[in-house]
Amino acid sequence: MVSVWEQLEKKMPAWLEESRKQARSGNVAAYIPELANASQEALGITIYNGRTDMITAGEHDMRFTLQSISKVFTLLLALMDQGEEAVFSKVGMEPTGDNFNSMLKLELVDPGIPFNPLINAGAITISSLIAGSTPAEKTSRILAFFRELTGDPALTLNEAVYRSETGTAHRNRSLAYFLKANRVLGDEIDVEEVLEVYFKHCSIEVSCSHLARMALVLAFDGTDPVTRRSLIPRRYVQIAKTFMLTCGMYNESGSFAIRAGLPAKSGVAGGILAIVPGQYGIGVIGPALNTKGNSTAGVHLLETLSTAFDWSIF
Ligand code: DON
C-alpha cells in the first residue's frame, strides 16, 4: 500500500502549482513598505514528520518574516514566564470577527482588555509580559526560544523589515497608547519599549523548514520528537493550539476550520504554520494575501491537502 508520505511526495508538485494560481487574486502586504518587495506568485511548502526527510515543494527556501506567526510563541513564552492566571487577566480568550489590527472592540467591552492574544492589541500586551528588564533582554529571550524550537542557532531578525515597520506603525502605536490609557499596559510600562519588542519578534526571519520544525513541536504537545526534549508544558500548547483554531486565521478562522480543520497561524508576510496533531508540522509561504490578511494560495494548498488526506481534527 502506498503510504500518505509517499502520496504526499508524489502529488505535492501538482497540488502546489494548482494552488499557485490563486496568488493572482491576492495582494502582497504593503502597509509595512519592506514587505511589498516580496514575489506575488511565490508559493512554497515544507512538511515534516520528525523521522524521515522533509517533503518540500516550490519556493520553500524563500526567506520571510514571521509577523503574526510569532504571536503564538510569545504567548507560550508569556505563559511560561507568568502563568495562566496573570496572562488571562490581561488578554481574553474570544475571537473578534474583526480585522487583526482593529481597535473597535477595545472600547466596546469592560474591562477594555484585548479579546485574544493573536490580534495586534493582544500580542502587544503579551510582549509586555515577557520576562526581562530591558527590551533587548526580552528580545534576546524570545530569539533564544525560536532558536531552540527551530534548532537553528543562526536565526535572527530582518533589520530592514523591523525598521520599515517601526517607522510606519501608526496604527499599532495608537493601539498601544490606547492600551496604556486603559491600564492594560500599567504605569511601569513604557509603550515604545513594548512596541520595540513586538516589532522585533514580528521581524524574525525564517523559511518554511523553520515553520515546519516549530509546528512539529506543537504537533507533539511541546516535546520535540526529534531531540525528545520537552520545550513547552503540554497545557500551554493546548491553549496555543485552541487559539490557533479559533483565531489563528483571523476572521477567516471559521471557514478555515470547516475546510481544513487544522490549528494554524498566518502572518502578513504570507507565512502559515499549520499542525496535523501527533503527525506533521507544516510551513507554507505565499506572499499574496486575501482580504482577510491570509496567504491566498497558502490557504488553498492547506485546504487541498487536508481534504485529500482527511486531516481535519473534527
Ligand atoms: O503588527 C503588524 O501589523 C504586523 N507586524 C503583524 C500583522 C500580521 O502578521 C497579521 N497577520 N496576518
Image (cartoon, rainbow, N blue to C red):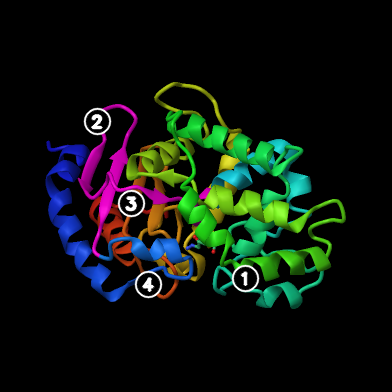
What residue lies at 82% left-to-right and 68% top-to-bottom?
181
Q: In front: mark 1 or mark 3?
A: 1
Q: CA distance from mark 1 to mark 3?
A: 29 Å
Q: In front: mark 1 or mark 2?
A: 1
Question: Circle 3 sits on which residue?
Answer: 284
Q: Quadrant of the C terminus?
A: bottom left
Q: Earlier in the sequence, mark 1 or mark 3?
A: 1
State whether label 1 is within 8 Å of ligand 1: no
Question: Circle 4 sits on which residue?
Answer: 290
What residue lies at 47% left-to-right and 62% top-to-bottom?
249
Question: Circle 1 sits on which residue?
Answer: 170
The amino acid at mark 1 is His
Q: Which residues are magenta?
A: 41-70
The amino acid at mark 4 is Asn
Total residue callouts? 4
Q: CA distance from mark 4 to mark 1?
A: 22 Å
Q: Residues within 10 Å of mark 1 (few under 14, many from 20)?
A: few
Q: Position of residue 130 (x, y in %)?
A: 70, 42
Q: Within the magenta stretch, is there residue 99?
A: no
What residue lies at 36% left-to-right and 59% top-to-bottom?
260
Q: Residues within 10 Å of mark 2 (few under 14, many from 20)?
A: few
State the residue in front, 124 or 56.
124
